[in-house]
């Protein structure tokens, strides 16, 4: 007379639980970072596209005259306003006679014809700018970050926005793509063995 016995899986064949947990933890961290980067890229594209529509403009500071708050390479958001609306303490962007942009803090404002006479000074400069600026419209700085200038410069390239949009979409798709999971009954080291003993 024979007797059939079913051997249970050996504990030693089961993969360590801790290693699997750590691997899944790192996968979640990488996925979160990818989603954050894609979100930042998408936000940059959105701001670059919508800022002109809202009467605003993203600007890159090319000098350190507004340091330490806004060093070289900072990105600021400027809103187009009448020069008569600004007040001492505001940071504005104006155009010099040669066309170059200057972003400095307002020291004095005086009405002048249809606009205003502005005395400006960079926060890092000891003296006010050599001559006042006569302007009717200025860019009032409403926000700024001390980084991002290189990225903004890259965005100004004609092909940058469509390429960045595709890259951001691809990153989001990759991060959210369903993972293939191995069925529990096919996991390595978990196969049952059937033995027949007499």
Image: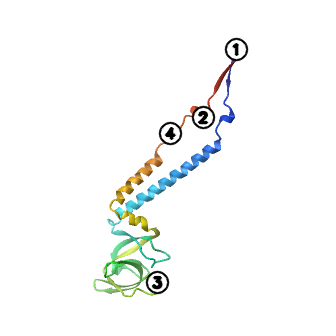
Spatial CA distance of label 1 from label 4 is 43 Å
Report, in whole angstroms, how far the alpha carbon at label 2 lies from the one at label 4.
15 Å
User: Which mark, by number, is residue 180?
Assistant: 4
Tag shown at residue 127: none
Task: Quickly name the residue at label 1.
Answer: 2
Q: Residue furthest left?
A: 114
Q: Position of residue 119 (x, y in %)?
A: 39, 85
* CB within 8 Å, label 2 to label 3: no
- Secondary element at tag 3: loop
**Residue where numbered disc 3 is placed:** 125
Q: How far across and how far down the image is residue 22, in percent? A: 61, 47
Marks 1 and 2 in Cβ contact (< 8 Å): no
Q: Residue at x 45, y 87 (%)?
A: 127
Front disc: 2 or 3: 2
Give the spatial CA distance, label 1 vs label 3: 98 Å
Per the image, the residue denoted by label 2 is: 188
Image coordinates for residue 77, horizontal then vertical, percent:
40, 70
């Amino acid at each position: 007379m024979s007797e059939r016995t079913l051997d249970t899986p050996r504990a030693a064949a089961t993969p360590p639980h801790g290693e699997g947990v750590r691997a899944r933890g790192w996968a979640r961290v990488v996925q979160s970072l990818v989603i954050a980067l894609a979100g930042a890229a998408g936000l940059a594209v959105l701001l670059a596209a919508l800022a002109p529509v809202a009467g605003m403009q993203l600007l890159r500071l090319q000098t350190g005259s507004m340091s330490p708050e806004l060093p070289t390479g900072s990105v600021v958001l400027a809103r187009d306003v009448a020069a008569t609306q600004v007040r001492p303490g505001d940071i504005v962007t104006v155009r010099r006679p040669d066309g170059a942009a200057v972003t400095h803090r307002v020291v004095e404002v005086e009405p002048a014809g249809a606009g205003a006479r502005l005395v400006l000074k960079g926060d890092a400069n000891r003296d006010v700018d050599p001559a006042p600026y006569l302007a009717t419209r200025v860019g009032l700085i409403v926000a700024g970050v001390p980084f991002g200038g290189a990225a903004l410069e890259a965005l100004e390239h004609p092909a940058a926005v469509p390429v960045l949009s595709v890259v951001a979409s691809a990153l989001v798709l990759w991060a959210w793509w369903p993972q293939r999971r191995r069925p529990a009954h096919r996991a390595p080291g978990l196969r049952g063995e059937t033995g027949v003993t007499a």
